[in-house]
Amino acid sequence: MTNNELLDHLNDRPSWDCVACGQPWPCATAQDRLVEEFQAFPSVLTIYMTAQMYDALSDLISQGRIAPADLFERFLAWARRAAVHPDGAERFDLDTISTVEPKRAVTR
Ligand SMILES: [Zn+2]
């Protein structure tokens, strides 16, 4: 077993590189583990990754670094794609949810 396999693939602030493999976090292994961890609640994964993206943005800006243009792709795009339930029984795609008509009109 290599050292990389012993370490959890967590982010290292403020660099936001993976502590195990050194790739920009979330690395492929971290993405796989996050999808597995949030499998029952994929929308919570999206919320969690949104918070992580804003923390990373704050850290990068506070170091005087330019925020990477691919932050959305890095932190959220894959999480939204992963929100499709693996067995295909249920779909939690935010793009689909946004087109659903409300079941009841709001009255005042
Ligand atoms: Zn990693």
Image (cartoon, rainbow, N blue to C red):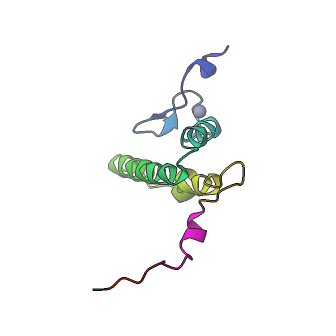
The quarter in which the C terminus is drawn is bottom left
Rendered image quadrant of residue 90: bottom right
42 or 13, nearer to the observer: 42
Q: Is residue 3 above or below residue 71?
A: above
Residue pictured at 54% horizontal, 43% vertical: 38
Question: Residue at the bottom extreme?
Answer: 108
Dominant SS type (magenta):
loop
Rendered-image quarter of ligand 1: top right
User: Where does residue 48 sit, x and y in percent of width and height?
Assistant: 45, 48
Residue pictured at 60% horizontal, 17% vertical: 3
Rendered image quadrant of residue 94: bottom right
User: Where does residue 41 sit, x and y in percent of width and height?
Assistant: 52, 48
Q: Read off the magenta span.
A: 93-103
Magenta-colored stretch includes residue 41: no
Judge from the rendering whether residue 7 lies leftward or rightward of residue 54; answer left or right: right
Question: Residue at the top extreme?
Answer: 1
92 or 35, nearer to the observer: 92
Rendered image quadrant of residue 30: top right
Judge from the rendering whether residue 87 lies leftward or rightward of residue 44; answer left or right: right
Q: Is residue 99 above or below residue 29?
A: below
Magenta-colored stretch includes residue 97: yes
Q: Is residue 96 above or below residue 102?
A: above
User: Where does residue 34 sit, x and y in percent of width and height?
Assistant: 56, 40
User: Where does residue 28 sit, x and y in percent of width and height?
Assistant: 64, 40
54 or 105, nearer to the observer: 105
